[in-house]
Amino acid sequence: MAHEKAGSAVTEKGAGRWRTFHEKFVVDERYVDPADRRGLYRASVILAVVGLALFIATLVSVVQADGLSAADHPVHDWLLTTRSAAVTAIMIFLAVFFGPIALPIIVLVVILVWGIAAKHAWRPILLASAMLTGVIVSQIILHIVQRSRPPVDQMLFGADQTFSFPSGHVLGACDFLLVGAYLIFSRRRNPRAAVFGFIGAGIGIILAIASRLYLGYHWPTDTLASFSLSLLILGGVIALDTWRTARIPGEPVTGELSKEESARE
């Protein structure tokens, strides 16, 4: 009898663990107003179109060496005149923070902690997918365009002779900050919090761009291309997240949060 109870307890424990694991990968749908859902789709399209158009314009100017890229050398030369020991130290810190070692570790920790702490892992998985998409896209474009960086002797944090267009540092920072801000604040009902969240993301992006330009590793159009690609990725994330999770009253739902809200209405 005791063995039967022990076996039953083990079975129930195993079933409970499997249920918890299964629920991690169940997308929790949510009720939104019809106007809000239309607004999300509209925002996703606008971001994608603006991002794509800006990237194409930047790419064409770089390939043809005119248009937007005409400002690359003047801006680069001006930044050389603004350098100082104190500012350089700050910019090196930012370069390390948004660099290929620190930022991936930060992103990995955020995704793992968020995925473990959250009941559903949809948003951490979406963030990871956006980051991975940015890496793949940037590597493909880098090797297609094969643009040279500014002179090596003007770089302040070691030589880098890899291709320059687009900036992987800036694209990674933009994806992490913009997509992360959307995934966090899209579930909150306070618009002011979302505004401050995206303002914070914008400040972080400006700092990441400034460090790459100041330290002499990129031309301005490299960073502009990265920002435009990130807008395109953000638009895709918003569209996918809205399509998969946003439900309006009258539509069937499976998420626990949506069921609770439905019961209260």
Image (cartoon, rainbow, N blue to C red):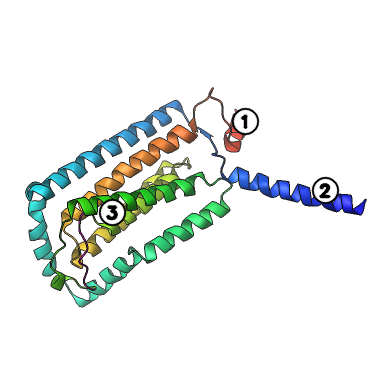
123 w.r.t. 103: above or below: above
Residue ID at (20%, 73%) = 156
- The residue closer to the viewer here, 152 or 171, is 152
Q: Residues within 10 Å of mark 2 (few under 14, many from 20)?
A: few
Image quadrant for the C terminus?
Answer: top right
- Magenta segment, which residues? 158-165
> Which quarter of the picture shows residue 255?
top right
Amino acid beneath label 2: Ser
Q: Is residue 155 left or right of residue 261?
A: left
Q: Secondary structure at mark 1?
A: helix
> Which quarter of the picture shows residue 241?
top left
Mark 3 vs mark 1, CA separation in Å: 49 Å
Residue ID at (48%, 42%) = 187
Residue 20 is situated, as x and y percent measured from the top left of the image, at: 65, 47
Residue at label 1?
264
Report the predominant secondary structure element of the magenta stretch: loop
- The residue closer to the viewer here, 191 or 131, is 131
| Pointers 3 and 1 in contact (C-beta within 8 Å) | no
Q: Earlier in the sequence, mark 1 or mark 2?
A: 2
> Which quarter of the picture shows residue 166?
bottom left
Q: Residue 92: within the magenta?
A: no
Q: Earlier in the sequence, mark 3 or mark 2?
A: 2
Residue ID at (18%, 55%) = 146
Residue at label 3?
139
Q: Residues within 10 Å of mark 3 (few under 14, many from 20)?
A: some
Q: Is residue 264 visible?
A: yes
Q: Which mark is residue 8?
A: 2
Residue 236 is situated, as x and y percent measured from the top left of the image, at: 36, 39
